[in-house]
Amino acid sequence: MSGISKSQVSRLCEEIDVKVKAFLDRPIEGEWRYLWIDATYLKVRQNGRIVSVAVIVAVGVNTDGRREVLGLDIGPSEAEPFWTAFLRKLARRGLRGVKLVISDAHEGLKAAIAKILSATWQRCRVHFMRNALAHAGKSGRRVVSAFVATAFAQNDAESAKQQWRRVADQLRPKLPKLAALMDEAEPDVLAYMTFPSQHRAKLHSTNPLERLNGEIKRRTEVVGIFPNEAAITRLVGAILLEQNDEWAVQRSRYMTLETIAPIPDDPIIGLPPMAD
């Protein structure tokens, strides 16, 4: 940009940093029933090398049915200490009341959710199906996808579990690896079925974050390789602040208050906390 000095650019960046920091460090008030967590991978320079880092975004829905961006962090996506520190930071800011966390399959995150939030984990159904269909072969993917979808079409959790097991048993003779994957993933992929039916379309995957992640990708591709993590926080944080403001002025709630507020502390829904 012509006509702008280095000092003006530096001052502008400082102003953005202050606003982004205030947004990301703000107190989290009220109770938040659902939490979606997803990662976008960006390239950054570290110690003279170019590395890929996970940019983690957390979005929640509170008991008023409103959604907000609750957190942002940068780190290795598979490391449990990273996930634990991220969730503890949210808890220190006031995050409470979480019943369900929806994310892709990160074992470190799954353990951290049980330890810090004592909430149920929902494995993203879309990501699971991609992994499952990799075991089906090109010719069998359409049939397998239709078979598994019959479990998702059930009206209640018990019926979904029974149908899931029937499908796994039908596939076992010819696709034993796929059947074993279904056995292992059943409680995590079907966790959302124990929640109100009005919410399930938004709970079974991280799809509600797709538009937000798409905007992050679009805006960060212009940069390509970031000079440091602070630059990532500045740009992505500004995008998240912009999106949060847009959600705040929307008149309609993301979910209805009447169906969110009564979710009980059901031992079937909650996971026991894990020891540190």
Image: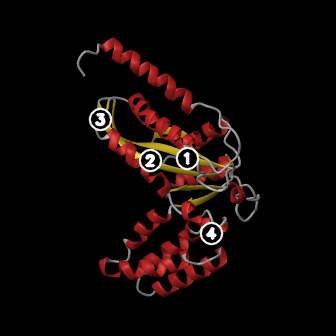
The residue sitting at 48% across, 44% down in the picture is 56
Q: Determine contact: label 1, label 2, CB under 8 Å.
A: yes
Q: In which quadrant of the rendered view does residue 221 lie? A: top left
Question: What is the CA distance from the residue labelled 1 to the residue labelled 3?
Answer: 24 Å
Residue 170: x and y in percent read 49, 87
Identified by mark 4, the residue type is: Met
**Which SS class for mark 4?**
helix
Pointer 3 or 2: first along the chain: 2
Mark 1 surroundings within 10 Å by alpha-carbon count, few (fewer than 14), some (14 through 19), many (20 or more): many
Pointer 4 or 2: first along the chain: 4
Question: What is the CA distance from the residue labelled 4 to the residue labelled 2?
Answer: 25 Å
Question: What is the CA distance from the residue labelled 4 to the residue labelled 1?
Answer: 20 Å
- Disc marking residue 133: none
Question: What is the CA distance from the residue labelled 3 to the residue labelled 2?
Answer: 18 Å
Pointer 4 or 1: first along the chain: 1
The residue sitting at 56% across, 27% down in the picture is 22
Q: Which residue is mark 2?
A: 212
Say if 197 sits above or below 33 in the image: below
Say if 48 sits above or below 192 in the image: above
- Disc marking residue 59: 1
Identified by mark 1, the residue type is: Val
Q: Which residue is mark 3?
A: 223
